[in-house]
Amino acid sequence: MYYQTVWFRLSGLAAFLALLWGLYQVRLRQLAREFNAGLEGRVNERTRIARELHDSLLQGVQGLTFRLQAVYELFPERPTEAIEALKIALDRGDKVIIESRDTVSDLRQSEVGDSNIGQALTALGEELAAQSDTMSRAHRWPVFR
């Protein structure tokens, strides 16, 4: 019979191996999608942090620079008004520093959450171990039992 021939058995074995290879490739793509989704989440979080820092720190410093420039131009003609404007600018500088500290503090707290550093490190270690385990499984051949 045709199914008893060597060629039929070899083509059946080749089809089975091709199926295994296809399943392996599907699993690799699935793991790559999961990894990329996690990476995209981290990039989005870092972008949010950069925007937050830009909005609070850089714009505050730029506004303070404009105020100091106005004081500089006011000084030769009206020194008493310049001193008052300088006091206002210094107060604004203090506010910028406080806002910047609060922003950076909030960013750190959002990364760590309400937990302490020990819990944060434990969570990070578990996340890295899970990623390492997932990636090491992706590079092994599937085991069928």
Image (cartoon, helix red, strand yellow):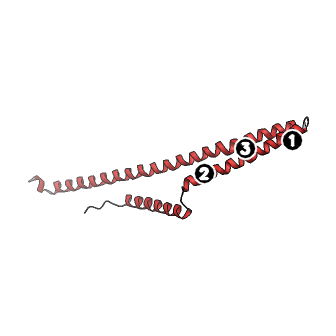
Q: Judge whether 53 appears above or below 10 on screen.
A: above
The answer to whether residue 98 is seen in the rendering is yes
Q: CA distance from mark 1 to mark 3?
A: 20 Å
**Marks 1 and 3 in Cβ contact (< 8 Å):** no
Give percent across and percent down for residue 15.
23, 52
Q: Which mark is residue 83?
A: 1
Instruction: Give the residue drawn at x 30%, y 51%.
Output: 22
Q: Secondary structure at mark 1?
A: helix
Instruction: Give the residue drawn at x 55%, y 54%.
Output: 111
Q: Amino acid at mark 1?
A: Ile
Q: Amino acid at mark 3?
A: Val
Q: Amino acid at mark 2?
A: Asp
Q: Secondary structure at mark 2?
A: helix
Closer to the camera, 99 or 6?
99
Looking at marks 2 and 1 on the same chain, the residue that comes earlier in the sequence is marked by: 1
Looking at marks 1 and 3 on the same chain, the residue that comes earlier in the sequence is marked by: 3
The residue pinned by badge 2 equals 106
Looking at marks 2 and 3 on the same chain, the residue that comes earlier in the sequence is marked by: 3
Quadrant holding the N terminus: bottom left
